[in-house]
Image: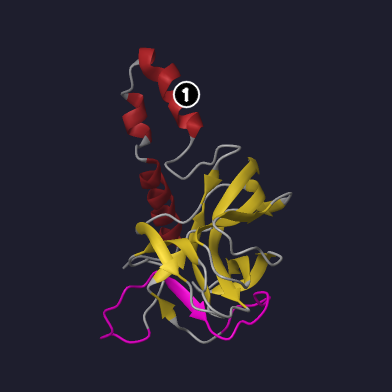
């Protein structure tokens, strides 16, 4: 039977396998290939990287459009893998609403795969067509799981339509085993003003999530 001391060895072996090759394999490397091998290793592991000046958002799922429901805040998972400073956050309004306020929000995960505390809440944005954003930001964003969303409220006639992603997400859980519905994000009802500092504890899955985009200022 293995002892507790064997855990350290197993953990080290797990880490080595994550690198993809062993010390013994390195001994077989041709001397002429060492410089290139070191160059590629310095690039780092296979992970998302962000170029300064470009916009990034949720990945996975088909990109489409979604008519928002008034007062319904909808958020979807955004996996962020490299430290970056964010200078702009926005959403593409594909079809204008007749009136009302549009808010964007970014929540940090609270540690259990669910949106928690707000990192950014915008001021009220116009519901006219185009990319509606907050500029001049200096948000230092470490790697982690975040939840990006929007809400539209104070509408009399027509709510805005925004760019969205649909499809099942590995980060979104279902409330029952037999529901068999699309799981792209979570929603919170009755948000009549700016998004709250903390997302609701009531779990309500959503079949779509807003495609919030963030512009990288530096990494």
Is residue 92 positioned above or below 197 on the image?
Answer: above
Is residue 3 positioned above or below 141 on the image?
Answer: below
Q: Is residue 133 visible?
A: yes
Q: Which residue lies at the image location 51% right of the left edge and 74% below the top edge?
A: 158
Q: Which residue lies at the image location 65% right of the left edge and 49% below the top edge?
A: 86
The residue labelled by disc 1 is: 39
Residue 170 lies left or right of residue 161; in this view the side is left
Question: In which quadrant will I find the C terminus?
Answer: top right
Q: Is residue 141 magenta?
A: no
Question: In which quadrant will I find the N terminus?
Answer: bottom left
Give the prevailing secondary structure in the magenta stretch. loop
Tell me the magenta residue range. 175-200
Closer to the camera in the image, 82 or 104: 104
Which colour scheme appears in the figure?
A: secondary structure
Q: Which residue lies at the image location 47% right of the left edge and 84% below the top edge?
A: 203
Is residue 54 positioned above or below 176 on the image?
Answer: above
Quadrant position of residue 21: top left
Residue 41, x across and y down, in percent: 46, 31
Q: Residues within 10 Å of mark 1 (few under 14, many from 20)?
A: few
């Amino acid at each position: 039977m293995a002892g507790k001391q064997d855990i350290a060895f197993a953990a080290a072996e797990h880490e080595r396998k994550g690198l993809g090759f062993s010390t013994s394999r390195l001994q077989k490397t041709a001397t002429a290939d060492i410089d290139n091998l070191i160059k590629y290793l310095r690039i780092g592991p296979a992970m998302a990287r962000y170029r300064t000046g470009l916009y990034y958002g949720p990945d996975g799922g088909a990109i489409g459009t979604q008519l928002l429901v008034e007062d319904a805040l909808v958020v979807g998972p955004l996996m962020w893998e490299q430290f970056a400073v964010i200078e702009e956050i926005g959403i593409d309004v594909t079809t204008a609403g007749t009136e009302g306020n549009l808010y964007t929000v970014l929540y940090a995960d609270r540690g259990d795969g669910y949106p928690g505390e707000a990192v950014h809440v915008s001021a009220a944005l116009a519901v006219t067509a185009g990319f509606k954003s907050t500029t001049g930001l200096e948000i230092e964003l470490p790697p982690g799981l975040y939840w990006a969303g929007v809400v539209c409220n104070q509408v009399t006639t027509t709510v805005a339509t925004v760019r969205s992603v649909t499809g099942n997400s590995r980060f979104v859980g279902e409330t029952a085993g037999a529901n068999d519905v699309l799981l792209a994000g979570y929603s919170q009802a009755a948000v009549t003003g700016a998004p709250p500092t903390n997302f609701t504890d009531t779990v309500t899955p959503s079949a779509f999530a807003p495609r919030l985009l963030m512009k990288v200022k530096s990494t």
